[in-house]
Amino acid sequence: MLQDGDIRLINFPKIFDERGNLSVLQAGKEVPFEIKRVYWVYDVPGGEIRGSHAFKTVTEIIIAISGSFDVILHDGEKEHRFNLNRSYYGLFVPKLVWRSIENFSTNSLALVVTDQLYNENEYIRDYEAFINQTKGL
Ligand code: TYD
């Protein structure tokens, strides 16, 4: 049974149409939290890596709205790798998960939906501190 806290892919509804397809996400439905903030990462130069941090309590969903990229997650015990390349999948990333995003394709667009407003104090940017914090969970 999936818990809200599990790393997983969420499949958003796809409404196929000859005029072009449409997908949707709704707070409390496909997104299991109240949406507080949406941000997006774009114009990433080839070879760049984004992320490389964890959050103390923030939950995120990462979507490849356009193009593709790899998301490498570490939960303190093991690594989980995802290649996101469809706009109708969202990667659910719980709190206390280290994430890096790399291999951005040209013109890729990463959309991130979160349950909290921006707060620099939420960031764990030191990997050793992150591993120590996940110990004993
Ligand atoms: P950061 O989350 O470190 O980017 P990434 O994880 O994609 O590499 O954010 C980079 C900078 O952008 C950060 O120092 C502050 C700013 N920022 C905001 O002001 N608001 C936001 O919601 C986010 C995500 C970042």
Image (cartoon, grey):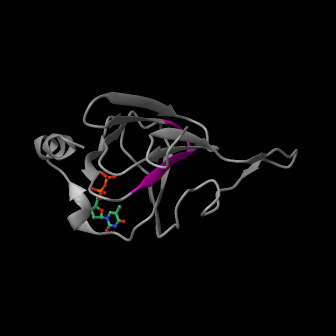
Quarter of image, ligand 1: bottom left
Type of secondary structure dominating the magenta stretch: strand
Task: Find the magenta span and give its range.
Answer: 59-68
User: Could you tell me residue 37's position as x and y percent?
Assistant: 46, 68
Query: Image quadrant for the C terminus?
Result: top left
Position of 16 with respect to 114 (left or right) is: right
Q: Residue at x 53, y 67 (%)?
A: 34
What is the total number of numbered labels drawn onto the structure image? 0
Which residue is located at x 43 percent, y 54 percent? Answer: 60
Closer to the camera in the image, 81 or 47: 81
Left or right of 88 on screen, residue 103: left
Front residue of this view, candidates 1 and 53: 1
Viewer-closest of 107 and 84:
84
Give the residue drawn at x 19%, y 41%: 136
Residue 14 magenta-highlighted:
no
Could you tell me residue 121's position as x and y percent? 21, 66
